């Protein structure tokens, strides 16, 4: 898996949020994207997933050699991209199991595979439920309806485990979680990470990165990646905040 | 007098002239007490005339296409070769069947096996045997002096359904009234009349389906009167699947006495111009009323639901939920009137209308009208008009589900609580299939994606 972002500039409702992003993610890599609020972290995650409200002003994104910007949200999912939402929406009336089965079989159809029957699907899904320590009962509940913040985030990781993407994007998955929920989320991601897939972990706080140890850390300030480094960079930000990075970036201009 | 007024006047005169012919054809029946009511009715109709959009109650619904045509009553039922009723019936249910073809009662297709304590059959036969109860109740409730279509139906009442449930009889069997338009002759006017009396403490449920065999242009003008006596309970489900070129005007008048219950479910799938008037009078305390309506329209359909609940006495509970999905250039109208009289303390009245618009050109006019004259009441109303939740759509797509499938999933959700409200669990599957099939045809007409 290879994701290449070059010179990406994105605006929303006339305001430019991403002002030239260059980033490359390969299989086996976990990239953390950190930054102060309003820096454009979520925008980057959502643009990758294919949300349509964004205007692509410039730049290109290639995914496995294909032009990602030309693909619809569902095509991207079928090509192996998964976004774990920051604010997962509730969908009353659509059960978790129904949605997932439809998704799994849509992706299988796209890949020319046979659909999974109800029994095989349930078997597969039960295994993944264990990963996020969720009870089977929640399968018949409506998607995210009445879920606590922690349950919603665990549901995202559960879905990611079921769909097994090549590129997993976590959009502030840790926000609003207590330490126990955080550990469950991290365990889920760690169980999935391997040589065949890559992850982009968007986070404001360093804490998650104690559990999901990144290979690369990028700091996003005002729509640009102003600093990149290894996992130590995250620890440095933890101790010193974001101001020094902002100052460094300003000085470099 | 303008040209339009001239043309308008002649359509009423056409029906009056038809009435004279009808009267002449009645022979002996023209001397029955009910015929006096018919005569009064045609006078009222001539005085009232068909409504125009200048009438408050018809502001959003023009009947000009209906009044532009001069419909005639059938002389006899169209004689098609074997009519197969099975698409319209509910299998596996204990039913009595009253089948009308082109307005004529069909003994052959009907199945009358009433339980004990129930009188059930053709209204005409009740007239013919001089059933006193018909005279006592028929036209006692329907406002023929005020409502033109009611007056017209009453003038032309020739046949229909009559049900009398004796005191304390709980009927498990469903009465299914089926109205079929054969299409053998076009431009027909049909005026089916239903009279139902549920005696004290009784329990009764009935379904009424309106279907056509092969399209056609016709004017279905139906009036029902339902008396729910003290402690009685009546459930009604109406399935309207008329031809797309048909005019369907229905007036249902219900009067509830103390401690009674009335539930209705309306499912409107067909018709070109549809207007349902549903009037419920809560004549005594402790009544419970649930009115549920579902409308599904596409192309150029117009589906208008007007309800009126009169809380005349205290401690009654009424609940209305009307939901619809409109696509193409369909037009929906919902007008829910609730009157809470000064004596009606501790009234609890809920009303909700929700419409999903699938296309740019579909529209809905929703108007709750609450007139509250008592001070210790709880009344809520709400109307929402919307498209599918964009956030939910994106979520589903981000999981690999294509846009059209995602939209279909969310539409199904909107529709599926309709299924739960259908009081006939045995028929739920069949009705669900009917609704989903119709939904699919509307969806495929709107291939251009979600409304902006």
Image (cartoon, rainbow, N blue to C red):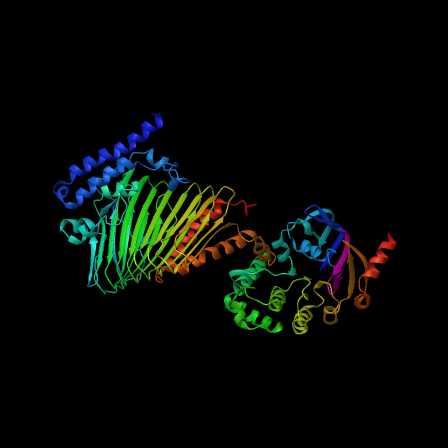
**Residue B181's x, y, as percent?**
29, 44
**Residue at the location (65% across, 53% down)?**
A50
- Left or right of B303, for residue A26: right
Q: Nearer the viewer, residue B321 or B24?
A: B321
Name the image quarter holding residue B73.
top left
Residue A21, placed above or below residue B26:
below
Q: Nearer the viewer, residue A108 or B236?
A: B236
- Left or right of B140, for residue A10: right
- Left or right of B212, for residue B35: left
Residue A253, placed above or below residue B45:
below
Query: Secondary structure of the magenta portion, mostly?
Result: strand
Highlighted range, magenta: A19-36
Observer able to see residue B401: no
**Residue B234's x, y, as percent?**
30, 59
**Residue at the location (69% across, 63% down)?**
A172
Is B347 inside the magenta-drawn segment?
Answer: no
Query: Farthest right residue?
Result: A251
Quadrant occupied by the N terminus of chain B: top left
Observer able to see residue B42: yes
- Left or right of A78, for residue B130: left
Is A24 inside the magenta-drawn segment?
Answer: yes
**Residue B93's x, y, as percent?**
30, 62
**Residue B44's x, y, as percent?**
25, 39
């Amino acid at each position: 898996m290879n994701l290449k972002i070059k010179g990406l500039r994105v605006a929303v409702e006339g305001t430019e949020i991403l002002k030239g992003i260059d980033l490359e993610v390969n299989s086996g890599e976990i990239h953390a994207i950190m930054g102060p609020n309003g820096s454009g972290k979520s925008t980057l995650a959502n643009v990758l997933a294919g949300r349509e409200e964004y205007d692509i002003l410039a730049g290109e994104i290639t995914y496995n050699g294909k032009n990602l910007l030309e693909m619809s949200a569902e095509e991207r999912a079928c090509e192996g991209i998964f976004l774990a939402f920051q604010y997962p929406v509730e969908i009353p009336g659509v059960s978790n199991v129904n949605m997932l089965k439809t998704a799994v079989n849509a992706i299988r159809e796209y890949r020319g595979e046979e659909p999974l029957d109800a029994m095989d699907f349930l078997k597969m899904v039960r295994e993944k439920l264990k990963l996020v320590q969720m009870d089977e009962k929640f399968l018949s509940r409506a998607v995210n309806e009445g879920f606590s913040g922690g349950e919603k985030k665990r549901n995202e990781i559960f879905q990611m485990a079921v769909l097994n993407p090549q590129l997993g994007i976590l959009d502030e998955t840790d926000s609003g979680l207590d330490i126990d929920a955080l550990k469950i989320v991290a365990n889920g991601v760690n169980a999935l990470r391997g040589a065949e897939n890559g992850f982009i972990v968007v986070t404001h706080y360093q804490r998650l990165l104690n559990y999901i140890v990144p290979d690369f850390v990028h700091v996003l300030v005002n729509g640009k990646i102003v600093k990149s480094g290894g996992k130590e960079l995250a620890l440095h930000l933890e101790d010193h905040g974001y101001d020094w990075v902002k100052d460094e970036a300003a000085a470099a201009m | 007098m303008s040209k339009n007024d001239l043309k308008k006047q002649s359509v009423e005169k056409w029906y009056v002239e038809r009435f004279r012919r009808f009267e002449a054809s009645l022979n002996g029946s023209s001397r029955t007490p009910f015929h006096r009511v018919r005569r009064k009715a045609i006078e009222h109709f001539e005085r009232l005339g068909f409504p125009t959009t200048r009438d408050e109650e018809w502001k959003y619904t023009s009947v000009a296409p209906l009044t532009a045509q001069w419909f005639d009553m059938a002389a006899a039922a169209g004689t098609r070769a074997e009519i197969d009723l099975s698409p319209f019936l509910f299998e596996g249910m204990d039913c009595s069947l009253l089948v009308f073809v082109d307005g004529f009662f069909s003994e052959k297709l009907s199945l009358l096996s009433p339980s004990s304590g129930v009188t059930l059959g053709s209204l005409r036969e009740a007239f013919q045997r001089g059933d006193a109860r018909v005279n006592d109740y028929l036209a006692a409730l329907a406002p023929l002096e005020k409502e033109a279509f009611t007056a017209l139906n009453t003038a032309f009442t020739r046949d229909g359904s009559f049900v009398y449930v004796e005191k304390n009889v709980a009927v498990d069997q469903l009465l299914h009234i089926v109205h079929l338009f054969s299409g053998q002759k076009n431009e027909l006017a049909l005026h089916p009349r239903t009279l139902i009396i549920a005696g004290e403490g009784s329990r009764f449920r009935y379904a009424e389906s309106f279907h056509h065999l092969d399209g056609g242009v016709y004017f279905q003008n139906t009036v029902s009167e339902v008396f729910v006596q003290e402690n009685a309970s009546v459930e009604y489900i109406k399935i309207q699947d008329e031809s797309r070129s048909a005019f369907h005007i229905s007036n249902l008048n219900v009067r509830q006495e103390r401690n009674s219950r009335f539930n209705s479910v309306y499912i409107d799938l067909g018709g070109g111009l549809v207007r349902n008037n549903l009037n419920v009078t809560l004549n005594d305390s402790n009544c419970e009323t649930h009115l549920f309506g579902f409308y599904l329209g596409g192309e150029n359909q117009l589906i208008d639901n007007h309800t009126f609940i009169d809380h005349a006495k205290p401690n009654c509970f009424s609940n209305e939920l009307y939901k619809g999905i409109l696509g193409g250039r369909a037009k929906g109208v919902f007008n829910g009137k609730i009157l809470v009289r000064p004596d009606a303390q501790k009234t609890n009245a809920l009303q909700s209308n929700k419409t999903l618009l699938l296309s740019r050109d579909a529209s809905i006019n929703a108007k709750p009208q609450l007139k509250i004259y008592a001070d210790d009441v709880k009344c809520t109303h709400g109307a929402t008009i919307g498209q599918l939740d964009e956030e939910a759509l994106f979520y589903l797509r981000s999981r690999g589900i294509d846009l059209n499938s995602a939209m279909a999933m969310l539409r199904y959700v909107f529709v599926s609580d309709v299924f739960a409200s259908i009081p006939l669990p045995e028929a739920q599957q069949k009705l669900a299939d009917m609704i989903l099939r119709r939904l699919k045809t509307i969806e495929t007409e709107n291939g251009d994606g979600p409304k902006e």
